[in-house]
């Protein structure tokens, strides 16, 4: 059988684990002696704690919290079902022309709420709109003189 450095380290690890387990066992026994209580006392303590935990699961507060959470979930579901979902614009009528999709998008953008960052630009847009409305025949050919 070969005994190499790996074999010795494994044996040392096993020995250290055994020493640690023995030390913990001694500490536990010393702690029990120091408390002056016997095994029966600690067993009764363990049972009392576990019984308290078992009662806590079925306590009045737990049942009340479950009832409130169930009621709130039901209310949220009913509200969600009762709210009207905004409907999309109707399909464009092609008899109006091919630009109906573009006009629908422009109309939707005009009536959409504007971010506050664009409010200063609206002053410029309103001025340009006023100038365009006040100028007559923009883009139309000049009347011919005879």
Image (cartoon, helix red, strand yellow):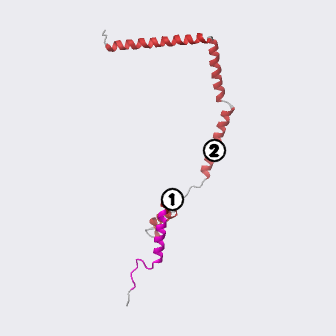
Determine whether, in the image, residue 17 is placed left or right of residue 85: left
Q: Residue at x 59, y 10 (%)?
A: 33
- In the image, taking residue 89 as reference, residue 64 lies left or right, namely right
Which label sits in the foreground, 2 or 1?
1
* 91 up-or-down from 47: above or below: below
SS assignment for the magenta stretch, majority? helix
- Quarter of the figure that contains the C terminus: bottom left
Q: Is 128 part of what is drawn in magenta?
A: yes
Please say whether residue 114 is one of the residues in the magenta stretch: no
- The residue located at (64%, 40%) in the rendering is 70
Residue 36 x, y percent position in the rendering: 62, 10
Q: Residue at coordinates 36% horizontally, 14% vertically from top-left?
A: 9
Q: Which residue is mark 1?
A: 116
Up the image or down, 67 lies above or below 137; here it is above
The span picked out in magenta is 120-143
Q: Within the image, what quadrant is residue 51 found in?
A: top right
Q: Which mark, residue 74? A: 2
Whole-angstrom CA distance, mark 2 to mark 1, is 38 Å
Question: Which of 137 and 86 lies nearest the eye of the viewer?
Answer: 137
Could you say whether the residue bearing mark 2 is in a helix, strand or loop? helix
């Amino acid at each position: 059988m070969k005994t190499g450095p790996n074999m010795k380290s494994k044996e040392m690890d096993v020995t250290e684990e055994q020493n640690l387990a023995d030390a913990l066992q001694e500490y536990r026994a010393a702690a029990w002696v120091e408390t002056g209580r016997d095994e029966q006392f600690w067993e009764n303590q363990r049972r009392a704690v576990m019984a308290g935990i078992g009662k806590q699961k079925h306590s009045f507060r737990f049942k009340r919290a479950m009832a409130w959470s169930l009621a709130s979930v039901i209310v949220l579901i009913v509200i969600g079902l009762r709210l009207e979902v905004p409907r999309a614009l109707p399909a464009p009528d092609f008899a109006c022309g091919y630009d109906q999709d573009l006009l629908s998008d422009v109309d939707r953008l005009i009536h959409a709420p504007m971010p506050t960052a664009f409010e200063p630009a609206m002053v410029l847009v309103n001025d340009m709109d006023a100038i365009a409305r006040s100028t007559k025949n923009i883009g139309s050919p000049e009347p011919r003189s005879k």
